[in-house]
Every structure is written in C-alpha cells, then in structure tokens.
Image: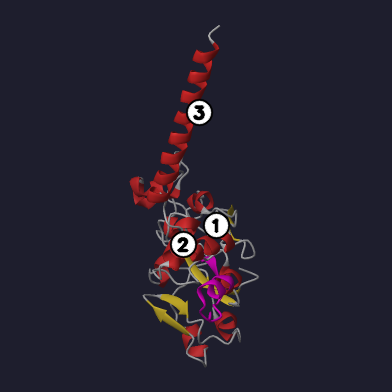
Amino acid sequence: MNITAILVAAAVVGCTGVLIGFFLGIAGEKLAVEVDEKEEAILGVLPGNNCGGCGYAGCSGLAAAIAKGEAPISQCPVGGSTVAAQIGAIMGVKVDESVRMVAFVKCSGNKEVSKADYDYTGLMDCTAMKYVPNGGPKTCNYGCLGYGSCVKACPFDAIHVVDGVAKVDKEACKACGKCVATCPKSLIELIPYDAQYVVRCVSKNKGKAVIDACGAGCIGCHLCEKTCEHGAITVIDNIARIDYAKCVHCGSCADKCPKKVIKFIHEA
C-alpha cells in the first residue's frame, strides 16, 4: 500500500470539500431571500387554517400582504379581533374593534313545509342542480336544495343539512365565507353574531306563488315594515330584509309576521 498516494488523495478530497463549502457559503449569501421579520411574526399569530376565507391562498399569503400594507390587519375571519389586535401590535397600528360575523341560511323550507315538482335521483350536489329541470326538484326556485355543497365547502364543520335545509352552528362558524360563495342559490349571508332576529326566506315571488310552493315563505305583505318603529326592516322585491345597524331587537316584526318567517335566531 502506497502511504503517500493515500495521503495525497485525502488531501485532495479535503481541499475539495473546503472549496465547495467556501463557494456554497458565498452563494448562500448572494442568493439568500431577505426575510421580512414582520411577515414572519404575523404568520406566527395567524391561526394556520389556510382556509382561504381571507381571499388569499393561505395564511402565508395573507401574512405577506399585511406586512406589505396590501391587506388590512383584520383580514383574517378565523382569528377575529384577537388575532387582529396581535397583528396590530406587530405592525404598530391601533385596531378598531370589529363586529363578529357568522353565516346564516335564509330558508325555512324544510321537508315538512316545502313542496316538490318531482322526485330527484342523481348526483347529490347543489351546484349540479343547474343542469336539471327547474333548477332542482323543489317548487320554490329560491329554496335550499339540501344536498350539502356548503357542508363540503366549510373547513370548520360549522354547517350541516337538517331536515333538508342547511343550518349553521354559529359557535363553530368563523365567517370565512366559503359557504356563501358555494351556495348556488345565494341563500347564505354573513350577519352579526349578536343579531337576534332573522328573515328565513329569499323568495322574490308574489304571495300566492310563495304559498303554493312553501308553507313557510315570505309573502311580502309589508306588515313587518309597517310595525317596525325604527326603520330596521323593509320589503324589497317581495322579501323582508333587516338592517342590523338599526335593529334594536324588539321583536315586533316577528310577532306581526303572519307566516312566521321572521324568527328569533335561537328558534330559527
């Protein structure tokens, strides 16, 4: 065995390793991506659900946008005011207290009161109903189809179909808006968490057509509008709508509604 050859080979390998390490060190410095400390800190306080409810692909995308001033610090619907306050501290800005929102399904047409034009057998998906006659088997073209597209879209298990109509668990809901965007009937909206009364119908049909289709639909009688002393409820396109900024939760509209479509939210 030639000791000299072994030593020379070892020296060559050692020198090669040193040179490679040297060049890698230089390359690392030259090609290093500058990390925004604020962005990293914001990402650290975001909930990490990556639900997309903020309008960005995930929490990292939102963190980058907030750090650059391209998105408001209260953009995360899951984190709410608590996370917004933490991000505000990181960004050095004051956060105004935001109103907690929750999703609400504006339909009372369960299996007991709603009527159907035919029996449907096929793909159980609400978004597929645009390809079937009348937009689905229900006589009311505005009602909840009950096939659960919103349930599949919700990343928080906050919405379920009960007796043919989707219903939101307001305690589990994070107001990410996924169900709102998914519903092909535009039945779901975000309302204040503290709202006391809701209108469970969106049918724009006139009274007789509503009655013929569903036993729990708004007939556009205007009695709720005339009863409210605060101007918090109006009837537009034959459907009652509540302005929650004006509503004082007196319940007079619900008491007057002949079809009991306006309900105390815990009964809805």
Relative horizontal placement of residue 234, taking residue 195 as reference (left or right) = left
Q: Residue at x 48, y 62 (%)?
A: 63
Element under disc 1:
strand
> For mark 3, does the 10 Å Cα neighbourhood hold few (<14), some (14 to 19), or many (20 or more) residues?
few
- Counting residues from the N terminus, which is met first, the one under dot 1 or under dot 3? 3
Locate residue 21, reporting x and y percent.
Answer: 47, 37
Q: Amino acid at mark 3?
A: Gly
Residue 99: x and y, percent? 55, 77
* Residue at numbered disc 3: 14
Mark 2 to mark 3: distance in Å? Answer: 37 Å
Q: Which residue is mark 1?
A: 166
Q: Is residue 68 left or right of residue 104?
A: left
Q: Amino acid at mark 1?
A: Ala
Q: Is residue 214 left or right of residue 197?
A: left
The magenta segment: 86-107
Q: Quadrant of the N terminus?
A: top right
Residue at the location (59% across, 57% down)? 158
205 in the magenta segment: no
Residue 225 on image: x %, y %:
47, 86
Residue 112 seen in the current view: yes
